[in-house]
Amino acid sequence: MDLSYIIIPIIVLITSQIIKLLTDGIKGNFDLQNIFISYGGMPSSHTALTVSLTTLIGLRNGFDNPLFAVALVFALLTMRDAVAFRGLLGKQAKVFNQLVKRLKADEQKNLPLFREQMGHSIFEITGGIIWGIGLTIILAWLQF
């Protein structure tokens, strides 16, 4: 079994999470816990991971291979989910948090605040695409 189909996308995922941590630091939101549990941010690591796998399949098996088509659909669904569905969840969390803040203090203590940054912008998705394709091509060229 060719483990590069696992190793290269994992390297892309980890490095994109590190980049996200650094870009959060530039914005003043540096938190080491975000390296594994963050949603949103630049670049989209989910996009980078799925695009990496798709790119690797295309490079090694051909862009006319049915497996490439399956991987591409998977990547597109992941990107759509990151923008649309998780974006909607973030908006709902913001509304919920505003409602909780209107309650009396003793009523608030039993209600958690929800994370509002859940989705990605098109810019963050594009960053994930560029990072996923670019690093995958380099690692594939190095025969990883």
Image (cartoon, rainbow, N blue to C red):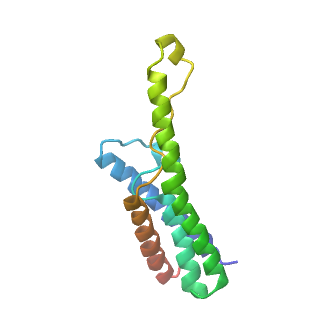
Q: Position of residue 45 (x, y in %)?
A: 48, 59
Give the image quarter of residue 81: bottom right
Nearest the camera: 44 or 28? 44
Give the image quarter of residue 123: bottom left
Q: Residue furthest right?
A: 1
Q: Is residue 40 above or below residue 92?
A: below
Nearest the camera: 61 or 111? 111
Question: Can the viewer see residue 38?
Answer: no
Nearest the camera: 36 or 112? 112
Q: How many marks?
A: 0
Nearest the camera: 6 or 57? 57
Q: Position of residue 89 (x, y in %)?
A: 53, 44
Residue at 55% over, 78% down? 56
Q: Quadrant of the N terminus?
A: bottom right
Q: Is residue 37 above or below residue 135?
A: above
Residue at 35% over, 48% down? 24
Q: Position of residue 118 (x, y in %)?
A: 48, 46
Residue at 51% over, 18% down? 108
Residue at 47% over, 13% down? 105
Task: State left or right for residue 43 relative to residue 96.
Answer: left
Q: Is residue 94 above or below residue 74?
A: above
Question: Can the viewer see residue 111?
Answer: yes
